[in-house]
């Protein structure tokens, strides 16, 4: 690809138009006018009125050990042990040595895209899914190839369309991404789907990247669902999560990668991520020392979020119970719900008067 003579000396990674969209412009104008806005998109837990034990959270940052710099590419053992205990409570025995701490799940994706794919190669991503993936992959020069999630009306559940997965795999495919539960569909992976994903990855020698940031927030027990995929598997697998959603603490940046799979591949992956992490050493020492105490607040903080999302989901269900034109699709977990609308238009158009759209996402956490 040749640059135009007048082009600026910046990377082609910045391929997106950066103009402010008309919805943002409209919101800015209303704020300048002093108009009160009730934001139904609010999913920032620190802005949602949760009762945080502030003293307990902040006091842990004052530990004397936080003043001592002890860099380790996988993160401090005390923090990795705390993460391993979190999985043990969920029925998975994870060795702390399988865990790499990162400053966020976004950084974890950056490491994995660097690890698995060269420029121009691709990773399969579910559709619909989180729009940030496009930017995270694009900044690493990695292409995203979508596969479909389909809503089955008769069973009222989202399922992976494996025909679209198979069709998307080619010689340049390096991994399959899975979000469990998905954002925004709220659908957990089912056991038969997991078996098929493992089969496809083994057949094509692909890695699995599993994002589980919302996995603690199921709306009910169901033996067909898999709440966490952090245990061992037949293929190379990377499970991502972090404190942002587990504790509702997005400002206390700490994420992680749990690596499992065939021993040779797992060890090599760990060594390469050691090199990547050692190059950046971005995880805050005070945050690592605080993490074990913060994770003990899991029940207190999650119960508040679960009560909020449950109440909001029940409110939505009541609003759509007898609606002729709009339907609330079943969600199994997470902080979002999907509303099916009768007409298809661009997303921005839907929020303007007299606009219609077929499918929209509504946040449950506000």
Image (tube, helix red, strand yellow):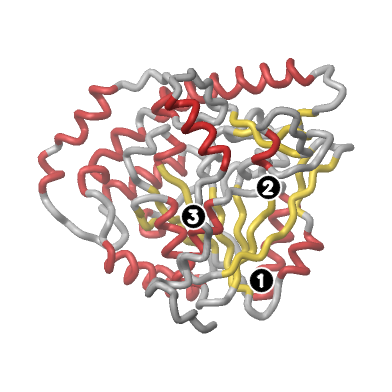
Residue 248 x, y percent position in the rendering: 42, 32
Whole-percent x, y for residue 163 in the image: 81, 62
Mark drawn on residue 18: 3
Q: Which residue is mark 1?
A: 202
Q: Is residue 174 left or right of residue 192?
A: left
> Of the residues under marks 2 and 3, which one precedes in the sequence?
3
- Numbered badge on residue 189: 2
Q: Splitting the image into 4 quarters, where does residue 204 fall?
A: bottom right
In the picture, the disc for residue 113 is: none
Looking at the rendered image, the quarter that the N terminus falls into is: bottom right
Q: Is residue 234 left or right of residue 116?
A: right
Residue 175 seen: no
Circle nearer the N terminus (1, 3): 3
Task: Measure how far apart labels 2 and 3 are at the Cα level.
Answer: 35 Å
Question: How many numbered marks appear?
Answer: 3
Q: Is residue 282 above or below residue 269?
A: above
Report the Cα–Cα distance between label 1 and label 3: 40 Å
Instruction: Indicate left or right for 165 with 245 as reference.
Output: right
Q: Position of residue 216 (x, y in %)?
A: 53, 36
Q: Does residue 358 appear left or right of residue 259 in this picture?
A: right
Q: Closer to us: mark 2 or mark 1? A: 2
Name of the residue lying farthest toward the bottom: 2
């Amino acid at each position: 690809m040749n640059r135009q003579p007048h082009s600026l000396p910046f990377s082609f990674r910045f391929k997106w138009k950066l103009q402010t969209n008309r919805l943002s412009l409209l919101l800015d104008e209303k704020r300048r006018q002093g108009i009160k806005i009730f934001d139904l998109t609010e999913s920032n837990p620190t802005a949602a009125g949760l009762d945080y034990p502030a003293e307990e959270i902040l006091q842990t940052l004052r530990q004397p050990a936080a003043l001592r710099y002890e860099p380790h590419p996988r993160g401090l053992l005390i923090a990795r042990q705390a993460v391993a205990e979190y999985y043990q409570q969920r029925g998975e025995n994870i060795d702390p040595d399988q865990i790499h701490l990162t400053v966020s799940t976004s950084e974890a994706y950056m490491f994995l895209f660097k690890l698995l794919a060269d420029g121009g190669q691709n990773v399969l991503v579910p559709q619909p899914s989180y729009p940030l993936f496009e930017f995270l992959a694009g900044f690493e020069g990695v292409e995203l190839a979508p596969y479909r999630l389909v809503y089955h009306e008769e069973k009222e559940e989202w399922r992976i369309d494996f025909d679209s997965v198979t069709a998307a795999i080619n010689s340049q495919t390096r991994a399959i991404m899975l979000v469990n539960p998905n954002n925004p569909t709220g659908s957990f992976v089912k056991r038969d789907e997991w078996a098929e994903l493992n089969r496809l990855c083994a057949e094509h020698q692909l890695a699995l990247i599993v994002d589980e940031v919302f996995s603690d927030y199921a709306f009910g027990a169901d033996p067909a669902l898999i709440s966490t995929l952090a245990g061992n598997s037949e293929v190379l697998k990377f499970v991502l999560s972090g404190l942002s959603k587990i504790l509702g603490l997005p400002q206390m940046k700490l994420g992680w990668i749990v690596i499992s799979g065939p021993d040779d591949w797992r060890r090599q992956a760990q060594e390469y991520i050691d090199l990547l992490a050692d190059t950046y050493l971005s995880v805050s020492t005070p945050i690592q020392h605080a993490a074990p105490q913060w994770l003990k607040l899991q029940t207190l903080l999650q119960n508040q979020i679960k009560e909020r999302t449950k109440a909001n989901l029940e409110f939505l269900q009541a609003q759509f119970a007898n609606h002729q034109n709009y339907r609330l699709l079943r969600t199994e977990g997470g902080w979002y719900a999907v509303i099916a609308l009768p007409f298809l238009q661009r997303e921005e158009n839907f929020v303007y008067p007299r606009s219609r759209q077929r499918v929209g996402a509504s946040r449950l956490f506000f």
